[in-house]
Image (spheres, rainbow, N blue to C red):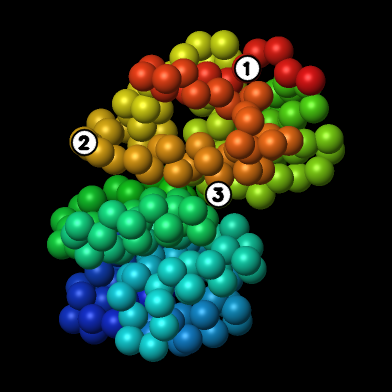
């Protein structure tokens, strides 16, 4: 049974979400402030975090940053509709996915299952090597010169898809479809945010990428030949 930490200040919404997820087989612990949620996260182990960005005592983005600084617990953000900048910043801070309010409980459940599935990964012990880069599928780790580079579950999955199609240009739509199994919404730039985080982790110079390359007007390509 996956253990979920829900940080949501709207108590009625928190109760509704908790009941729905528990009926789906999850164990849910709810906190109504950012500080209470951080305290729970620090004391107990959770499989995933559902985080509202509008909290009464602190910015949900700060909660996201602190949780990510403590480990790799998957994070699903809940955002107010239209807060595109908050979503971008949240993804940059390490959130795995976001869901705008109001939302359908079924979509929340589907997205939560998806980030949990990505975080658990494939048990098959396979390592892909590209020059100084190693992608350890079984351990869900990326290493540069033998040193692990931090990526969220979503970012690891995105890099893995690019690596499995090395040398082939992948459009944003194709990447979104393969990682999240849904089409990219107009003006959605979440893929670009994740790519920038991947570059920060694995490129020698993220401003002059040589491993994950932009093909203007087409998408991204993972270089087959690497140093």
Q: Secondary structure at mark 3?
A: loop
Q: Nearer the viewer, mark 3 or mark 2?
A: 2
Place of residue 142 in the rendered image (x, y in percent of width and height, measured from the top left): 69, 38
How far apart marks 3 and 2 lie (CA) works out to: 24 Å
Tell me the crowding category of disc 1: few under 14, some 14 to 19, or many 20 or more residues within 10 angstroms, Cα based: some
Q: Which mark is residue 186?
A: 2
Q: Is residue 72 left or right of residue 110?
A: right
In the displayed image of the protein, which residue is found farthest to the front?
A: 207
Q: Is residue 148 above or below residue 78?
A: above
Residue ID at (50%, 24%): 214
Place of residue 51 in the rendered image (x, y in percent of width and height, measured from the top left): 38, 68
Q: Which mark is residue 223?
A: 1
Whether residue 21 is visible to the viewer of this picture, yes or no, is yes
Whether residue 15 is visible to the viewer of this picture, yes or no, is no
Place of residue 40 in the rendered image (x, y in percent of width and height, measured from the top left): 52, 82
Q: Is residue 206 above or below residue 210?
A: below
């Amino acid at each position: 049974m996956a253990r979920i930490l829900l940080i949501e200040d709207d108590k009625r919404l928190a109760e509704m979400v908790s009941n729905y997820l528990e009926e789906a087989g999850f164990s849910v612990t709810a906190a109504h402030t950012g500080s209470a949620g951080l305290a729970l996260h620090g004391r107990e182990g959770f499989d995933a975090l559902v985080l509202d960005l509008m909290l009464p005592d602190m910015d949900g983005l700060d909660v996201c940053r602190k949780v990510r600084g403590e480990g790799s617990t998957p994070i699903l953000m809940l955002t107010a509709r239209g807060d595109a900048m908050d979503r971008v910043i949240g993804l940059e801070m390490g959130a795995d996915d976001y869901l705008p309010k109001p939302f359908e409980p079924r979509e929340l459940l589907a997205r939560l299952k998806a980030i949990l599935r990505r975080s658990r990964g494939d048990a098959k012990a396979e390592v892909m090597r590209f020059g100084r880069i190693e992608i350890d599928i079984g351990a869900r780790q990326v290493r540069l010169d033998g040193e692990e580079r931090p990526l969220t579950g979503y970012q690891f999955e995105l890099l893995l898809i690019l690596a499995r199609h090395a040398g082939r240009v992948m459009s944003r739509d194709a990447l979104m479809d393969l990682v999240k199994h849904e089409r990219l919404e107009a003006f959605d730039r979440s893929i670009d945010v994740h790519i920038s985080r991947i570059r920060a982790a694995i490129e020698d110079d993220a401003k002059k990428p040589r491993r994950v390359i932009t093909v203007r007007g087409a998408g991204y390509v993972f270089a087959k030949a690497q140093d």
